[in-house]
Image (spheres, grey):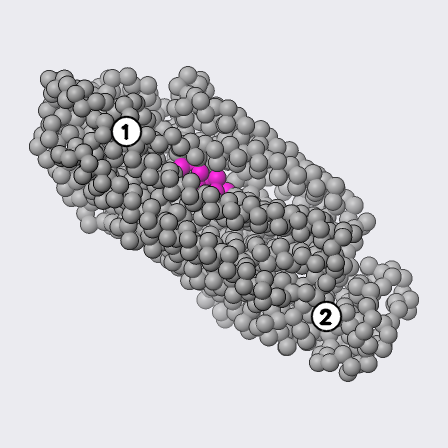
Amino acid sequence: MFVHLQGPWSPLLGRLSAEQLPFLHIPIIEYTFAVVVLLGLVVVGAVTYLGKWGYLWRGWLTTVDHKRIGVMYILIGLVMLLRGFADAFMIRLQQAMAVGPHSPGYMGAIHGYLTPFHIGQIFAAHGLIMVVFAATPLLVGLMNIIVPLQIGARDMAYPYLNAMGLWLTAGGAALVMASLFIGNFAHGGWYGFVPYFELSYSPGVGVDYWMWAFQLSAIGTSLGSINLIATIVKMRAPGMTWMRLPIFTWASLSTNLIALTSFPVLMVSLALLGLDRYLGTHFYTAGMGGNLMLYNDLFWIWGHPEVYFLILPAFGIMSEIIPTFSEKTLFGYATMVIASFAIGGVSWGVWLHHFFTMAAAPSVNSFYSVTTMLVGIPTGVKVFNWIFTMYRGRVRFELPMMWALLALFLLLVGGMTGMMNAFASNDYMWHNGIFVVAHFHMMVLLIAASIFGAVEYWFPKVFGFRLEQKWGKLFFWFMVLGTGFVFVPMFILGLAGMTRRLDYIPYAAWAPYMQIEMIGIALYVMALAFFLAHLYVSLRDRSKNLAEADAWGTGRSLEWMTHSPVPSYNFAITPHINTRDEWAWRKENGLTELHAGEYEPIHMPKNTGVPLVIGAFFFALAFGLTWRIWWLSLISVVLIVLMIILRSFQKDTDMTIPPEEVERTEKRAIDTLYPSSRADVPVYPGGTVGTATAYQRLSASEDVGVSSTGTLPHASVDR
Amino acid sequence: MDPQGLIAKTSYHYFLLDVGIMLLIVVPTAALAIWAMIRYRKGGKGTYQPKWAHSWTIEAIVWGIPLITVGVLSYLSVKAIYAVNPYNPGAISQAQKKAGGDPLEVDVIATDWRWLFIYPKQHIATTNELVVPKGIPVRFRLTSTSVVNDFIIPQLVGMIDVMPGMRTKQALVSDHIGSYVGFSADYSGAGLSWMHFTTKVVSKHQFSSWVSTIQTDPQKLTLNGFNRFARPYIPVGEKSQPKFGEVQQGLFDLVVNEVMKGKTWKTPMDMTENMVAYLNNQNELQKEGYY
């Protein structure tokens, strides 16, 4: 059909055949498959045994609650992070084994244990998974949970759309995982090379898997970004003016503006590749009028803003954690906001630095070299602002703060090496080299460090208990050590001239560096074990670590005002915002009482299974397209359209929580934490229970007769 | 990081300047961060001022330092780009004036997965071996038959993309007699790791005698022969690489035109899908005289 395909095709199964099931022929995949099947059976068995299918369906799979959707995003992110790490482990092991012409080969490889096409798949999967299916869902999940809380909203602007975004991303992730056992994945780098990804040079289904998985996640993320922007613009609580917006929400706004404007470009660039591969057009081919540079331009017009899409929320997280644990206001709030938007703005004007060596005129390269360096200015400002936030503070080194500070130091290394790459004459020497790889891993690890910090920091808000510290600290320090051992040798090799994506390294002299990197990988594996222990011990001892509304005692923004865990409606009564760092201000003025005098009915969206089903059909569509099973794709498209039409006729999509139920929930939340009766709770001077509450509008503190002098205890209710 | 040619040396010079200036900023910043962490730790000696969040002086400094640094580095970067840009490197132009005469021209064609070096004036070609005379500027024209490659000889000259259906340029001057390794850096498929070549820098005299030796080689390279040569092949552990004593006039341009018109050398599916047997497959084909 339209194009010449190598290999067999049948109308029923498309290109699928028994030969395309690698776990039947390749030992490594055979074992992985056995483990995955076993784990899957254990999970299914456990859920059935515990009788939790109903709970899973009603509480999670059909939910439109932004916090639960966020948690599921983070779960997808963590699972994919693990998969990406397994890929990294395999790449490092291969490179440590296959150094020098005399290094032995195993399992059909000439050197090491992986054949060139196999390691090609692994590093393509590693890159795509880490960027698109680990970092992105983790950050989108965090924004999903925190942004509505920080602006005092009940949910996102479009809860149903939110679930759509989640299940599309899940569909994409599932497709990447499917490629492990059915067929194979793209053999090139994660960002796709043309014409290498054309049918002539990548004749199998690998690139199609890559393309459709990428496409699904791109659609999902775009939908998510529309939702977050609408939420921030339209759903802010009364009194939350722009300059009172918490800094993480600012970062989310700028990052989603980037996503909304750049992801469509990615979809187009992938769609054109799809036309080439399915219909035989010549957008990116070398001959017949195709232009392979078009792909590089289009892809990186998305690709570079995507980098800032990932890093801005990370900066936002650091800007939340550092003031909380410095017990002090963030230094230079306005500057931070300007810097975030400056980074966002410059992000569209730097993409050409991804192909400095593509023979652009020196004037063009000069322009992009300078614009790239401009990013260094707002980033440098942010670093200084964080340092001056700690200055004259009282810095507490708890786990979230440790991660945030690690991110700060990684930013110094990553930023400096980034400036070195931006200096185009350096880039000529190592453009496709290991130095660049080490640089962007610094940046991605910075993002990972702030994500870990954010998970530690906001975990009690979502689940109602803090994570324990002992295993968490071991996890932290082993991550630090592992990073040192892996990436210092990598920088050295980069300067020595080692190039990227090698399956076999001809220089025997480089072997020691590769072996040191393996020590780092071993440390990472131990860190992973500590991370699992950290989660397990925290879960086991959760009753010892129950968290108050203000879990860390020095929280500053609005999310620390409602209960931990947050009730489904977030705030019993929509709070009125009086100032920036609202919660810190309320604590100073004793306006922290969470009992409202009277509760009102709350209007909330209803659960729906439609997004999950549509997500499943999208997976079927992408799978059908990948294998060219046309009937499956056609049926999926028809069903997707049908579902969307049917859903639009459904009128019963919302519900009202009656005030009595709100009151019950509120009482239960407070009683869990403070089993003693409410009568024992001391009332702050000047306030009476039920009259002065955290929910009320207070333009001046005198209104309720609270003395503005004198410090009050930080906890919402003192024991 | 051991530059042996003019372009690499110029790059290295700017690299040192760049890193020096960066360290001047980054090291004190890191020190400041560590100082703040220690001095203002809870229970430490620092004074506690929870409301202090703004100072015009500090704002001016935190914007000023990055601004000045980036300004200086930008100036240096632009200067460096013009000095080493592959199409008309300022450094090479100066060397050309000094050396006089004509530069040596070499046409480079990257296939899957070998490098073919054509010396159009000498009518010879070599595979995976580049020989250049010391001190004479060499100007390259580069193209690829199938996918994008990246041409680099780390000790002599930086990277330039080698693209199918297109022509890029590069130039170098070498200072010392010796042997240097060149690589393909951009991912081009299974043979990438084996796609390196030797660069021999020899004296002028040795160069001309080398040229006449190659010219006596009976193998001829025409477009038809090239079409066979360019089929996917991984040069694993290969000692002798084909040399051609005579090359069809204008072969480089012919290849660029062919590729522009849509000629491709497809990768066989057996090679990408059956990942263990990919080399056996190649060996079989070789026995059958495919290459």
Q: Nearer the viewer, mark 2 or mark 1?
A: 1
Gap between marks 2 and 1 measured at Cα = 69 Å
Q: Is residue A186 visible?
A: no
The answer to whether residue B51 of the structure is visible from this angle is yes
- Amino acid on which disc 1 is placed: Asp
In the drawing, what numbered circle is on residue B175? 1
Q: Residue furthest right?
A: A680
In the image, residue A72 sits, relative to residue B225, either above or below, namely: below
Residue B212 is covered by the magenta coloring: no
Q: Is residue A483 left or right of residue A644?
A: right
Mark 2 is surrounded, within 10 Å at the Cα level, by few (under 14), some (14 to 19) or many (20 or more) other residues, namely: some
In reply to whether residue A440 is colored magenta, the answer given is yes
Q: Which residue is mark 2?
A: A585
The magenta segment: A432-441
Quarter-of-image position of residue A78: top right
**The C terminus of chain A lies in quadrant:** bottom right
Q: Main secondary structure of the magenta part?
A: helix
Residue B65 picture location, percent across and down: 51, 56
